[in-house]
Amino acid sequence: MSQKAHADWDPGLYHRFRGLRLRPAMDLLRGIGPLPAGDVVDLGCGSGAAGPALRQLGRPLHGIDLSDAMLEKARAGGCYDRLDRADISTWAPQTPSALIFSNAALHWVGGHGSLIPRLAGHLAPGGTLAVQVPHQNNAPSHRLWLTLAEELFPGRVDPETLPQAMLPAEYHRMLRGLGHVSLWETEYYQELDPEGSGHPVRHFTEATFARPVLAALDETEQARLVRAYESVIGSAYPASESGRVLFPFRRLFFILTVGAGSAN
């Protein structure tokens, strides 16, 4: 599974929950230690939300993404020295990187068993690969999109098009021979505000996880699936009297630092 190229990402929809999506990036960044000489790569940079923080590292900053719309948004922010459109599954830097930082992107790319070691091989000695991916696929918020689609439209949605991640123990086994590894999970208890008509969890997930599910259907089928999702999602994530919803969301983090080198 290569990086998905359905209808381009909508930065406006994605940014509805910008603060909630940015917090894990900042938590990942705080775990990074001293870096050797070299560039910083924001792999799957999206709209460039993490750019200002990464810029503070004082290194040349390169952003990589497959979405033209997201790259345009990142370019407008003015934080990056260079922005390139590329598929993460085949991307390689021109020179070894001090830091490859990837927040909420690699779950859209398959083959982590080969992808992650390949990315580690692009690091300078003493360099760091820092990754965060959602680990939410078994939660009702995500699982219901797929189960309802299969009930209503059997065989229409290819599970291989969905974002995926390995188990934490699988990442640890793969990474421990490559360098020093720090791996953890965090469950964020996110309070979502009402978003006009519709359940807030539906609005949160349809801009990300549900994109390939909805892309497999025509407009009439999409509307039917959304109605079915809306009819059950409130049981899993009930709204308060104010309409706000507490939405637990689990994310997986790992930081790999390769072979000893001079860091500064």
Image (cartoon, rainbow, N blue to C red):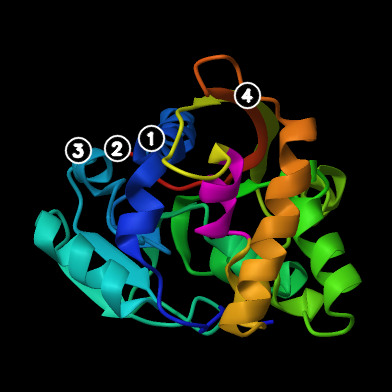
Q: Which residue is mark 4?
A: 239
Amino acid at the residue labelled 4: Ala
Q: Quadrant location of residue 212?
A: bottom right
Amino acid at the residue labelled 3: Gln
Q: Residue at x 53, y 46 (%)?
A: 204
Q: What x and y, as percent, mark residue 88?
A: 50, 76
Q: Residues within 10 Å of mark 3 (few under 14, many from 20)?
A: few
Q: Which residue is mark 3?
A: 56
Q: CA distance from mark 1 to mark 4?
A: 44 Å
Q: CA distance from mark 2 to mark 3?
A: 14 Å
Q: Which element carries disc 3, helix, strand or loop?
A: loop
Mark 1 in CB contact with mark 4 (< 8 angstroms): no
Which residue range is magenta in the image?
201-209
Task: For marks 1 and 4, give the one nearer the viewer.
Answer: 4
Task: For marks 2 and 3, give the one nearer the viewer.
Answer: 3
Q: Quadrant location of residue 45?
A: bottom left
Amino acid at the residue labelled 2: Asn
Q: Which residue is mark 1?
A: 34
Q: Is residue 161 above or below residue 180?
A: below
Q: Which residue is mark 2?
A: 264
**Nearest to the observer: residue 63 or residue 156:** 156
**Nearest to the observer: residue 255 or residue 262:** 255
Amino acid at the residue labelled 1: Pro
Q: Which element carries disc 1, helix, strand or loop?
A: loop
Q: Residue at x 90, y 69 (%)?
A: 151
Q: Earlier in the sequence, mark 1 or mark 4?
A: 1
Q: Residue at x 36, y 45 (%)?
A: 16
